[in-house]
């Protein structure tokens, strides 16, 4: 599962029907204890929490540690605002191919076969979406597969924490604008978009089998396993990893450092779990800058 796609799926297809929780093998007797980091500043504390953006409703992940962090936070920080209205407008304006173009016809024969098989694997009619841009179809495939497995954006970590913060009148901040997030998914270069889509189609069916393992690894706080299931799958495309993960991690360190050095209070930073793992993850980058970071 590509976490960044899951996040954007929660924007673009937030009205997609959510399947019933059909993943007893994923969550049965699963005692969730996700990783949580505490970063110590001069007058502030920053909690770092890696999110799974689509989760089964039955998975209870707010243990005592996480609930305490949420309750003690004065300010909540996310990747971007969860603005479904803006997403729908963006989809209407940027989700279709130019008149007369066919998605299938843009693909080489091998990718055409992948598209047909991928759509069939989640029971979607291929012809219905043949005028949609590649990025839309990739989001659609990810979202439908996740909902078929019992996961839902409304049960995801980001939505749950943001809803709690809003209900208590807590201020919220964002590392990126909605436009920046959408640019990650719908690049201006059609050739890049098509290349990314072809790679996505090739891996889609095999990656679906990893989703339960990702939930288990995240729930257990197993950062090594989570990295193996996510970052390692991007090893063959280092430029994509750099654009989607590494550069963003580095960009987020500066505002976190400002919270630690120049502000007071308690901050709860929640971003995709992919951004927390490995030597280029946010916790590791902060440690490299000399901050005391408690956690895995």
Image: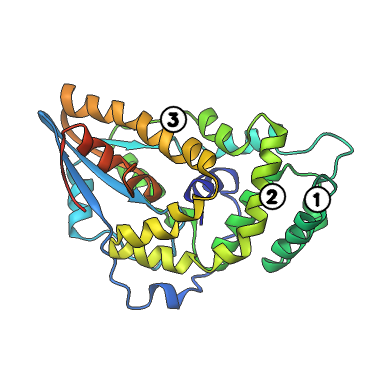
Tell me if residue 292 can be seen. yes
Q: Position of residue 19 (x, y in %)?
A: 56, 66
Please tell me which of labels 1 and 3 falls first in the chain: 1
Circle 1: is it few (<14), some (14-19), or many (20+) Cα within 10 Å?
Answer: few
Question: Which residue corresponds to the image point at 40% horizontal and 49% vertical from the top-left?
Answer: 274
**Circle 3 sits in a helix, a strand or a loop, which is it?**
loop
**Circle 1 sits in a helix, a strand or a loop, which is it?**
loop
Please tell me which of labels 3 and 2 falls first in the chain: 3
Q: Which residue is mark 2?
A: 198
Name the residue nearer the viewer: 69 or 201: 201
Q: CA distance from mark 1 to mark 3?
A: 35 Å
Question: Which residue corresponds to the image point at 44% horizontal and 65% vertical from the top-left?
Answer: 56
Q: How is the image coloured?
A: rainbow
Disc number for residue 108: 1
**In the shown orientation, is residue 72 left or right of residue 219?**
left
Q: In this view, which residue lies farthest toward the left?
A: 42
Name the residue nearer the viewer: 23 or 106: 106
Determine which quarter of the picture holds residue 221: bottom left
Tell me, yes or no, whether the two marked residues, 2 and 1, touch with CB atoms within 8 Å. Answer: yes
Please tell me which of labels 2 and 1 falls first in the chain: 1
Q: Which residue is mark 3?
A: 176
**Circle 2 sits in a helix, a strand or a loop, which is it?**
helix
Tell me if residue 92 can be seen. no
Name the residue nearer the viewer: 139 or 232: 232
Q: CA distance from mark 2 to mark 1?
A: 9 Å
Determine which quarter of the picture holds residue 213: bottom left
Q: CA distance from mark 3 to mark 2?
A: 27 Å
């Amino acid at each position: 599962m590509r976490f960044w796609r899951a996040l954007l799926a929660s924007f673009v297809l937030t009205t997609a029907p959510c399947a019933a929780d059909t993943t007893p093998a994923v969550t049965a007797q699963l005692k969730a204890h996700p990783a949580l980091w505490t970063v110590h500043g001069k007058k502030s504390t920053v909690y770092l929490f890696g999110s799974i953006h689509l989760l089964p409703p039955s998975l209870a992940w707010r243990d005592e540690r996480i609930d305490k962090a949420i309750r003690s936070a004065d300010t909540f920080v996310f990747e971007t605002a969860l603005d479904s209205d803006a997403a729908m407008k963006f989809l209407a304006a940027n989700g279709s191919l130019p008149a007369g173009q066919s998605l299938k016809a843009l693909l080489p024969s091998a990718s055409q076969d992948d598209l047909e098989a991928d759509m069939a694997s989640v029971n979607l009619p291929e012809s219905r979406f043949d005028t949609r841009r590649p990025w839309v179809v990739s989001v659609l495939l990810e979202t439908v597969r996740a909902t078929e497995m019992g996961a839902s954006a409304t049960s995801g970590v980001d939505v749950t924490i943001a809803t709690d913060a809003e209900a208590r009148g807590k201020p919220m901040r964002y590392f990126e604008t909605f436009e920046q997030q959408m640019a990650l998914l719908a690049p201006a270069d059609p050739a890049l978009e098509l290349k990314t889509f072809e790679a996505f189609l090739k891996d889609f069916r095999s990656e679906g089998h990893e989703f339960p393992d990702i939930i288990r690894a995240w729930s257990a706080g197993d950062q090594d396993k989570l990295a193996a299931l996510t970052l390692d799958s991007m090893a063959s495309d280092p430029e994509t990893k750099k654009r989607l993960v590494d550069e963003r991690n580095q960009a987020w360190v500066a505002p976190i450092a400002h919270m630690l050095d120049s502000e007071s209070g308690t901050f709860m930073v929640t971003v995709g779990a992919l951004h927390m793992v490995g030597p280029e993850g946010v916790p590791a980058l902060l440690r490299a800058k000399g901050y005391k970071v408690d956690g895995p």
